[in-house]
Image: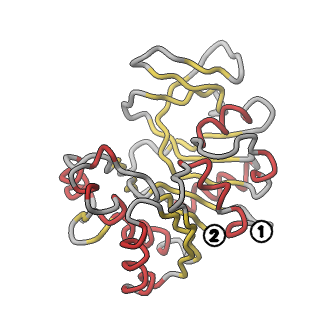
Amino acid sequence: MKAMIFSAGLGTRFKPWTDKHPKALAIVNGKSLLQRNIEYLQQYGITDVVVNVHHFAEQIIDAIQVNKGWGSNIVISDETNEVLETGGGLLKAKDLLNGSEPFLTLNVDILTNLDLNKLIQFHKEHKPLISFGITTRETSRYLLFNENNRLCGWKNIKTGEEKISILTPTLDPKAYSCVVVFQPEIFSLIPQRGKFSLTETYLDLAAEHLILGYDHTGDKFVDVGKPESVLKAEAMFK
């Protein structure tokens, strides 16, 4: 299985580190976020990895080269001309991920011990277009699911903004874990172009295509999105 690690973001929440470095190279207990996620994938035999770059791209490329990919085969998807967010970044990497098998994506600033074998098995059993990790943790923006954990919508609880793809009597809010398994036909179905978030794509496709959440509540999970979250990550991931 191939994987893609989204590493191109500007990391505006992670200043002042990101004034001079990419967030992907932020250190947690002596290892960068990028190295930790590459080694996380290696635990499940995933060693063919696409890494997209934009902000201080040369620092990421140098780190990969100096460390010989930390033992993985890493291919760069170059977004130095324009940061494309997760959806645009995935679409740009189409030729690097294309094939007949499912592939996996994750965000470089997420650390988790979600069992990828269980997520992949869930995907194979239920045969959705997309499967991704979800938990019951608190957040400001929730994905909304029916009783079978089928994606039906999205809600921002701070602003009250809501987008419903499938009307259903009960909607269960869950937090998105940013670890995703895609069927390869996703590339022919994505309606957006340019710079866009994968969440937009999920909500556009959810009514006509099965998109499922895999609940892994109880697993370790930390969004290393802000400098203060490094301490939490260091306590959780040695």
| Place of residue 64 in the rendered image (x, y in percent of width and height, measured from the top left) | 42, 79
Q: Is residue 76 left or right of residue 103?
A: left
Q: Quadrant of residue 91?
A: bottom right
Q: Is residue 215 above or below residue 5?
A: above
| Place of residue 176 in the rendered image (x, y in percent of width and height, measured from the top left) | 49, 40
Q: Is residue 96 above or below residue 7?
A: below
Q: Residues within 10 Å of mark 2 (few under 14, many from 20)?
A: some
Residue 125 visible from this viewpoint: yes
Does dot 1 land on a helix, a strand or a loop? Answer: loop
Does dot 2 land on a helix, a strand or a loop? Answer: strand
| Place of residue 2 in the rendered image (x, y in percent of width and height, measured from the top left) | 63, 70
Quarter of the picture containing the C terminus is bottom left
Q: Which mark is residue 99?
A: 1
> Of the residues shown, which amino acid type is indicated by label 2?
Lys
Count every numbered label the image shows and give the total: 2
- In this rendered view, identify the residue nearer to me: 172 or 105: 105
> Of the residues shown, which amino acid type is indicated by label 1?
Gly
Residue 222 visible from this viewpoint: no
At 62% across and 33% down in the image, what residue appears?
A: 149
Q: Is residue 200 left or right of residue 41?
A: right
Quarter of the picture containing the N terminus is bottom right
Q: Residues within 10 Å of mark 1 (few under 14, many from 20)?
A: some
Q: Which residue is mark 2?
A: 2
The numbered mark, 2 or 1, whose residue comes first in the sequence reads 2
Q: Are marks 2 and 1 in contact (CB under 8 Å)?
A: yes
Q: Which mark is residue 35?
A: none
Q: Is residue 151 left or right of residue 139?
A: right
| Place of residue 213 in the rendered image (x, y in percent of width and height, measured from the top left) | 59, 40
- In this rendered view, identify the residue nearer to me: 150 or 19: 19
At 27% across and 46% down in the image, what residue appears?
A: 226
At 18% across and 52% down in the image, what residue appears?
A: 231
